[in-house]
Amino acid sequence: MNTKIANLNGLEILDSRGNPTVRVTVELESGAHGTASVPSGASTGMNEAVEQRDGDPNRFSGKGVLRAIEHIETEIAHAVVGRDACAQIEIDSVLVDLDGTPNKARLGANSILGVSMAVACAAAAAAGKPLYAYLAAGRPVRLPVPMMNVLNGGRHADSSLDFQEFMIMPVGAPSFREAMRYAAETFHALRALLAADGHTTAVGDEGGFAPKLANNEAACELIVRAIERAGYHPGEDICIALDPAATSFHDGNYNLERSGQGRKNSKELIELYESWVSKYPIVSIEDGLAEDDWSGFRRMTAELGEGIQIVGDDIYVTNIDFIRRGIDEKCSNAALIKLNQIGTVSETIDAIEFCRSAGWRYIISHRSGETEDSFIADFAVAMDGGQIKTGAPCRGERTAKYNRLLEIEHQLGADAIFDNPLKELPFSSTLCAPHGSQ
Ligand SMILES: C=C(OP(=O)(O)O)C(=O)O
Ligand SMILES: [Mg+2]
């Protein structure tokens, strides 16, 4: 099979926020092709790779995205046409060198990532393999436990919540399909509880509800009630994961005034998390502190890291330089992994290898501005980390990933592996009252 790249095409499409983004198609000389679309974040880290995009989110036809497409069809095409699509590492390093900046600002992380992902998709198609099997290259694969976002705040919603994401993790489910059932039933129970309490059931950017609750803690209480109402046991069947995205409310202090909880320093915010962890079945906290609060992350990991997963997102931006520092300084025990934070498939895999080598967990994640592309579903299975964060079980750009995972589990049949990646944490046996009876 001739896997040489014959042609690249870029297309301006819309993301789930109605903003322009990039879709790339790579055609091989054999006729096989691959297509990938690039997502976009709202609570972005300051050290993320930079996308070429319209600065004004209210303008439909972004000049930035058109520029990204022009780069794809001219400079990038010139550099990669004729190369072997199976040589992912080589192609990614050509893209990085061609850009020449530390953060991919010249060609745009969106142009580069779109090409990088589409190359992988085309090579998988040429090999006649599902994308996850191609990316795994013979290594073990695993269905991930979803970290499903059910309540939205912060930069993702106009709710009363300072914290960006309140998620449920169906850790006790026996399969991915059952995990989706546990989580979707809880999501529906939550909707019913909100409606019964007179709250709006409108949703935020990632499909989680966006109500005006009394404060952030009320969200945890409500989720425990929803888990119970759906017939599950909090802390056994379903746990809670948080992404406060603390950079977004950090202005020197942590400003929780949106929910009426005042201002806190790092130590006080960690104490708040500690008190919640003792009351609610919380197993994971991502970006509990701001991206530049390395000492806060260290303290939080020292105080809570034995019991729960401490995840760095904005602080590491899927970049081995920051992850290395986090490992050296014991700033967390896990990293969030977002392809577009770093900008190529190979560099993302390098970041994952770094996490693995330190014994860290890693969670493959979507962005708040998404497309129907399901690349990350295959990627999560292939990377064998056992966790994915991809929003609520509603809205097509989120269900595209969940439905792809259901399809993969079905295809794998008896070979499908699904287990709780957090099972060695002492949390569920020691901290959570049985059956969620706080
Ligand atoms: C998915 C997230 O949000 P965004 O894409 O807006 O960065 C996140 O912070 O984990
Ligand atoms: Mg985050």
Image (cartoon, rainbow, N blue to C red):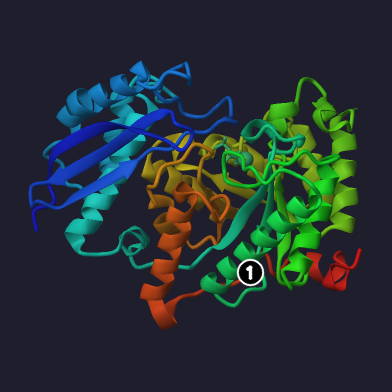
Q: Is residue 206 visible?
A: yes
For ligand 1, the image quadrant comes to top right
Image x and y of residue 337, in percent: 53, 46
Image x and y of residue 125, in percent: 21, 57
- Location of residue 195 with respect to 81 vertically, above or below: below
> Residue at image x 13%, y 37%?
7
> Residue at image x 83%, y 72%?
435
Categorize mark 1 by other alpha carbons within 10 Å: few (<14), some (14-19), many (20+). Answer: many
- Location of residue 431 with respect to 391 vertically, above or below: below
Q: Is residue 426 visible?
A: no
Quadrant (top left, top right, bottom left, bottom right) of the N terminus = bottom left
| Residue 265 located left or right of residue 66 | right
Quadrant (top left, top right, bottom left, bottom right) of the C terminus = bottom right
The quadrant holding residue 247 is top right
Helix, strand or loop status at disc 1 = helix
> Residue at image x 67%, y 52%?
167
Q: Amino acid at mark 1?
A: Tyr
Question: Which one is in front, 25 or 16?
Answer: 16
Image x and y of residue 171, in percent: 66, 68
> Residue at image x 27%, y 51%?
121
Furthest residue in direction bottom, as rendered: 414
| Residue 276 located left or right of residue 346 | right
The quadrant holding residue 227 is bottom right
Question: Which one is in front, 317 or 25?
Answer: 25
Mark 1, residue position: 182
